[in-house]
Amino acid sequence: MLREQIQRRGLGEKNGFRWRGGEVSRIEGFSDAVFAFAVTLLVVSLEVPRNFEELLGTMRGFLAFGICFTFLVWIWYEHYIFFRRYGLQDGFTIVLNAILLFVVLFYIYPLKFLFTALVALFFNLAPPGDAIEIKANLAPALMIIYSLGFLAIFVIYLLLYLHAYRKRAALELNAIELVYARSDIYAALINIGVALLSILLASSGGVRSSFWAGIVYALNGPLHTIRGVATGKRIEKLQKQALALASPAT
């Protein structure tokens, strides 16, 4: 299983954070199957080309597929990190995980529709038979649907991380792990805030507002960079304090 191979290599493991997830659980195994099915839904409309012209036509849809696939990998990676770090399998976690998987499966269709349309619009790349036309007055509604899905996913991740943080005593999180846990909560809040801003912009109506509702997602880059730098500084400070306490008095 892919998750087991990644786990053995320690991908995503951060210095100072002990992984509490042991063997791949049934929750993780089931979730991986659902994510794999979601990828299948992305390519279900792609048929095996029968000649070179059809091959070229099919390849025109690969960019949109690649964007959607990258997004799914990101969501899966967030899932992987959470369960490796905290290893929670209680009822509340199971319910939230089930809701997350449901949203992911539902989200595939607006995700594919949006990026197929955008790639066709900006790069004139659309596979034959998949040409998508969006009326200007419906563009805001499309962005709202996309942003609602994005919002739902990270609200669930926020609830998962808050749940883990509430169990910090039972999980025996140390000072460094608590910093990482709070950073993950802030990350989810950033994504939620950007999604809400996008919905607000799209709700104002018009093609221009829809354009800015999409552009606003670029804020994720600098905001997460600032969060990462701040987290790194806190971790570095704690590590220096730990070294100072461990070193013999002079």
Image: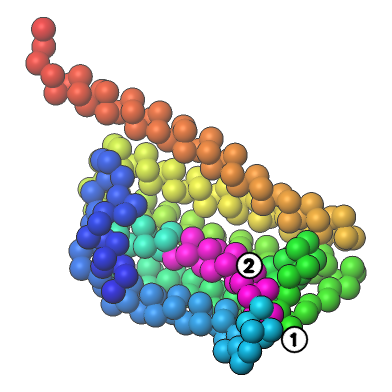
Q: Is residue 15 magenta?
A: no
Three-letter code for the amino acid on which mark 2 is drawn: Leu
Left or right, residue 116 beside residue 22: right
Relative height, residue 28 to residue 161 (above, below): below
**Can residue 87 be spotted in the picture?**
no
Q: What residue lies at 79% left-to-right and 77% top-to-bottom?
A: 132
User: Taken as a whole, is the magenta stretch helix, strand or loop?
Assistant: helix
- Looking at the image, what colour scheme do you see? rainbow
- Element type at mark 1: loop
Three-letter code for the amino acid on which mark 1 is drawn: Gly
**Can residue 222 be spotted in the picture?**
yes
Query: On the rendered image, what quadrant is the C terminus found in?
Result: top left
- Element type at mark 2: helix
Q: What residue lies at 43% left-to-right and 59% top-to-bottom?
A: 78
Q: Which residues are magenta?
A: 57-76
How crowded pointer 1 is (Cα within 10 Å; few <14, some 14-19, many 20+) is rated as: few
The dot on residue 190 is: none
Left or right, residue 243 beside residue 211: left
The dot on residue 129 is: 1
Relative height, residue 132 to residue 149 (above, below): below
How many marks do you count on the picture? 2
Residue holding disc 2: 63
Q: Residue furthest bottom?
A: 50
How crowded pointer 2 is (Cα within 10 Å; few <14, some 14-19, many 20+) is rated as: some
Q: What residue lies at 20% left-to-right and 19% top-to-bottom?
A: 244
Q: What residue lies at 65% left-to-right and 45% top-to-bottom?
A: 219
Relative height, residue 28 to residue 6 (above, below): below
Between 232 and 72, the residue placed more toward the observer is 72
Q: Quadrant of residue 232?
A: top left
Residue 112 point in image, percent of width and height? 65, 74
Left or right, residue 66 beside residue 184: right
Query: On the rendered image, what quadrant is the N terminus found in?
Result: bottom left
